[in-house]
């Protein structure tokens, strides 16, 4: 997971602060030393680290934070604010042309994920803006680059313009722009060539394409796993092409975070998107404030809510809520819910977006194996239609048959059925507004964890509905 080492080090430093009643300058000096080491180990640019530590220390002392009764909370707040500033403060949208088409030029080194990102961005524009993008395959040097873009185009149902590998890339772009004008495409995404390192021939070609296409946006794709060298790459491309934004890829990998925390300060260019997965939907707008909260282990509920809105079918969710209220939720519905949750990404990453969960010691070594859900799915598929719809009929002999059919131990089958029953009871209680004794009913397995995730939203929903009912009754009495 991205920033895992940095998050752990910063959390430890913040925890030491919270344990102290009043913080002295010596305490602050020790904490700032730990923060500086954590940032340097995360491969953050030395100049950025030096300035960051200096500003945090000055703010902590200068604003008389140390004399406050809540000094530890205020220092955490200052660190959070300064981390956000380092990464850019606010999300920066795409530069759009006042009239179609908006032209986006993708640049970057070979292997950074440029072609895949072009496909992800095209899909994002298609889904969120109902756009009609055209992708232009202008990388004629990398083996199979054009084929890769064509495959993506077919899978995403997005047109790709290509003229093979024998035509000059500048000419390919020229004819691609003409086709886009004829077909009235509102976005053009140009996938340019990359190299293993910056060289003069690459920059000359990119400069010619830039002069011809006059792009509204030049997005530099940077592999975040390369750490400090990613910053050097960004500086090189920016000096030659004056890029307008950065896309950080592979943030779901074993990245220490140095690129994300350095690149804005060093280049002055905003990070506009981040890639956090292999699926074509795994491209997110970069929000500096949300990323700072995640780095400090404070969660990221806004992104979690957006993921849920994006990946959960609204009608299906309403249908499930109704089933919970009527106590008719069965194993068929359970399968549907698991499918939707899996679309949101790795469960341990989702759990860490919930405030408090990233700091929870129980979450430190949690690895939710996708096979766990596959095993649960196999268990449900081993049931008859009657058993899925009416779990009450699952007597010991039926459970033994299900365990044999799924190839799972009988203990595991019994545990899953028990957790399913507890989840139904819990959801019924929540829907009726009764939340007493809920903690004891939440299991420790996958089912229990999924149920915990929805508790807060259910509480808010019930409170809101209760207020509406009270207001309605009051008006009717009038």
Image (spheres, rainbow, N blue to C red):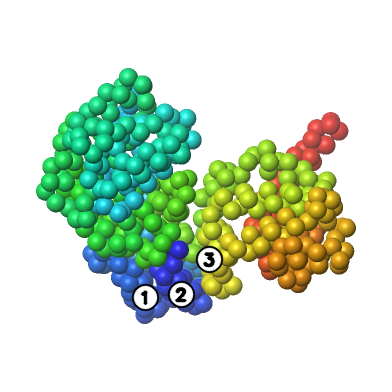
Q: 68 or 360, which lies in front? A: 360
Q: Quadrant of the N terminus?
A: bottom left
Could you tell me how far apart the alpha carbons at marks 2 and 1 are, in whole angstroms? 9 Å
Q: Are marks 2 and 1 in contact (CB under 8 Å)?
A: yes
Going from N to C along the chain, the mark reached first, 2 or 1, is: 2
Q: Is residue 97 visible?
A: yes
Q: Nearer the viewer, mark 1 or mark 3?
A: 3
Q: Identify the residue at horizontal 79%, vertical 35% (top origin).
A: 472
Q: Are marks 1 and 3 in contact (CB under 8 Å)?
A: no
| Mark carried by residue 34 | 1
Going from N to C along the chain, the mark reached first, 1 or 3, is: 1
| Mark carried by residue 358 | 3
Q: Identify the residue at horizontal 23%, vertical 42% (top origin).
A: 140
Q: Identify the residue at horizontal 68%, vertical 38% (top origin).
A: 315
Query: Measured from the top left, where is residue 428 in percent x and y?
Result: 80, 53
Q: Is residue 90 visible?
A: no
Could you tell me how far apart the alpha carbons at marks 2 and 3 are, in whole angstroms? 12 Å
Going from N to C along the chain, the mark reached first, 2 or 3, is: 2
Query: Measured from the top left, where is residue 393 in percent x and y?
Result: 88, 58
**What is the crowding at mark 3: few (fewer than 14 residues within 10 Å), some, or many (at least 20)?**
many
The residue at the far top in this view is 182
Q: Identify the residue at horizontal 27%, vertical 27% (top origin).
A: 177
> Compared to 34, does 209 lie above or below?
above
Query: Measured from the top left, where is residue 125 in percent x and y?
Result: 43, 35
| Mark carried by residue 12 | 2
């Amino acid at each position: 997971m991205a920033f895992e080492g940095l998050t752990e080090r910063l959390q430890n430093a913040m925890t030491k602060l919270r344990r102290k009643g009043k913080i002295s300058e010596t305490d602050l000096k020790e904490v700032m030393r730990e923060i500086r080491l954590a940032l340097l180990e995360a491969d953050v640019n030395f100049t950025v680290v030096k300035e960051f530590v200096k500003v945090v220390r000055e703010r902590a002392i200068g604003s008389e934070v140390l004399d406050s009764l809540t000094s530890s909370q205020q220092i955490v707040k200052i660190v959070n604010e300064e981390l956000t500033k380092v990464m850019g403060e606010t999300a920066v949208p795409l530069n759009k042309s006042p009239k179609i088409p908006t032209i986006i030029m993708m640049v970057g080194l070979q292997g950074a994920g440029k072609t895949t990102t072009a496909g992800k961005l095209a899909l994002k524009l298609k889904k969120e803006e109902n756009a009609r993008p055209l992708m232009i395959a202008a990388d004629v040097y990398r083996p199979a680059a054009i084929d890769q873009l064509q495959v993506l185009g077919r899978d995403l149902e997005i047109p790709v313009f290509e003229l093979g590998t024998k035509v000059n890339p500048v000419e390919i772009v020229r004819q691609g722009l003409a086709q886009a004008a004829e077909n009235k495409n509102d976005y053009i995404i140009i996938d340019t060539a990359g190299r293993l390192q910056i060289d003069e021939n690459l920059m000359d070609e990119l400069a010619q394409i830039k002069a011809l296409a006059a792009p509204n946006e030049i997005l530099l794709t940077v592999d975040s796993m390369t750490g400090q060298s990613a910053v050097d790459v960004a500086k090189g491309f920016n000096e030659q092409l004056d890029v307008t934004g950065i896309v950080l890829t592979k943030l779901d990998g074993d990245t220490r975070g140095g690129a994300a925390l350095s690149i804005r300060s060093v280049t002055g260019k905003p990070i506009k998107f981040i890639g956090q997965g292999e699926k074509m939907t795994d491209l997110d707008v970069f929000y500096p404030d949300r990323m700072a909260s995640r780095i400090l282990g404070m969660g990221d509920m806004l992104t979690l809510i957006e993921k849920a809105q994006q990946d959960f079918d609204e009608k299906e969710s309403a249908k499930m809520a109704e089933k919970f209220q009527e106590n008719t939720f069965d194993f068929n519905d359970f399968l549907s819910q698991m499918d939707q949750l899996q679309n949101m990404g790795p469960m341990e990453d989702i759990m860490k977006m919930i405030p408090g969960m990233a700091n929870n010691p129980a979450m430190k070594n949690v690895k939710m194996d996708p096979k766990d859900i596959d095993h649960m799915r196999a268990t449900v598929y081993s049931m008859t239609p009657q058993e899925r719809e009416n779990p009450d009929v699952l007597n010991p002999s039926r459970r033994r048959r299900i365990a044999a059919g799924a190839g799972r131990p009988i203990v595991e089958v019994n545990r899953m059925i028990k957790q399913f029953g507890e989840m139904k009871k819990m959801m019924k209680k929540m829907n009726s507004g009764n939340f007493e004794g809920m903690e004891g009913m939440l299991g420790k397995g996958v089912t229990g964890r999924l149920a915990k995730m929805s508790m807060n939203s259910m509480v808010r929903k019930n409170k809101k509905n209760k207020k509406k009912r009270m207001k309605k009754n009051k008006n009717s009495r009038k």
